Image (cartoon, grey):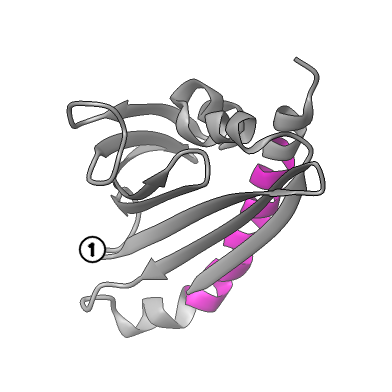
């Protein structure tokens, strides 16, 4: 399952980057994020790991992440696993930023790679999950754009 999103944001890439990378700013646009803590030493970069706590309904889920691409302020890609994803499932998220029309073009791709142990009935549910994922993504991105474009 793959979801793509593109939008122009009225700020420079380095400003938008802060909202993608800094945990306190992530909480402002990623609904449900309670915490995002590094689990590896050193500055962020390819191979760095982190753990996100996300409120999902009445429960808090722990997601483990690994940075797979890091080119500040142009590209950030991560693999997420755990939480409420089925066993062996990884979600690959890729943010690419480029200058466009005096602002920043944001290209976003999220791809769910299901583990081999995913039951057949869950595979049938993936198209429904994609619809809900797109709806949630639109809300996140609308909030991100609003925050990034707000006067300082």
Residue drawn where x is 59% and y is 32% of the image: 14
Residue drawn where x is 28% and y is 76% of the image: 118
User: Is 20 one of the magenta-colored residues?
Assistant: no
Rendered view: 6 above or below 83: below
Residue drawn where x is 55% and y is 25% of the image: 25
Residue drawn where x is 77% and y is 30% of the image: 149
Q: Is residue 55 left or right of residue 90?
A: right
Rendered view: 49 above or below 81: above
Residue 120 on image: x %, y %: 33, 85
Label 1 sits on a secondary structure element that is loop
Between 119 and 110, the one lying in front of the other is: 110
Residue 117 occupies which quadrant of the picture?
bottom left
Between 47 and 142, the one lying in front of the other is: 47
Residue 27 on image: x %, y %: 53, 27
Residue 122 on image: x %, y %: 38, 76
Tally of numbered discs: 1
Q: Is residue 114 left or right of residue 16?
A: left
Number of residues whose C-alpha sits closer than 10 Å to that of mark 1, classed few (under 14), some (14–19) or many (20 or more) = some
Rendered view: 86 above or below 145: below
Instruction: Name the main secondary structure of what is drawn in magenta.
Output: helix
Quarter placement of the C terminus: top right
Which residues fall within the magenta stretch? 126-143
Q: Can you name the residue that lies furthest to the top here?
A: 152
Q: Is residue 29 left or right of residue 35?
A: right
Residue 123 on image: x %, y %: 40, 80
Rendered view: 137 above or below 35: below
Between 40 and 119, the one lying in front of the other is: 40
Residue ID for mark 1 = 87
User: Is 138 one of the magenta-colored residues?
Assistant: yes
């Amino acid at each position: 399952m793959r979801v793509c999103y593109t939008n122009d944001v009225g700020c420079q890439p380095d400003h938008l980057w802060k909202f993608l990378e800094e945990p306190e700013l992530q909480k402002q646009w990623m609904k449900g994020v309670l915490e995002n803590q590094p689990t590896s030493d050193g500055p962020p970069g390819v191979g760095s790991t982190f753990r996100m706590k996300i409120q999902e309904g009445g429960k808090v889920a722990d997601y483990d992440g690994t940075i797979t691409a890091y080119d500040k302020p142009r590209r950030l890609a991560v693999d997420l696993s755990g939480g409420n994803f089925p066993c062996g499932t990884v979600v690959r998220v890729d943010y690419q930023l480029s200058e466009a029309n005096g602002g920043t073009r944001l290209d976003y791709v999220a791809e769910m790679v299901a583990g081999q142990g995913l039951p057949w009935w869950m595979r049938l549910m993936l198209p429904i999950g994609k619809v809900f994922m797109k709806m949630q993504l639109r809300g996140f991105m609308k909030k991100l754009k609003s925050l990034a474009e707000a006067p300082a």
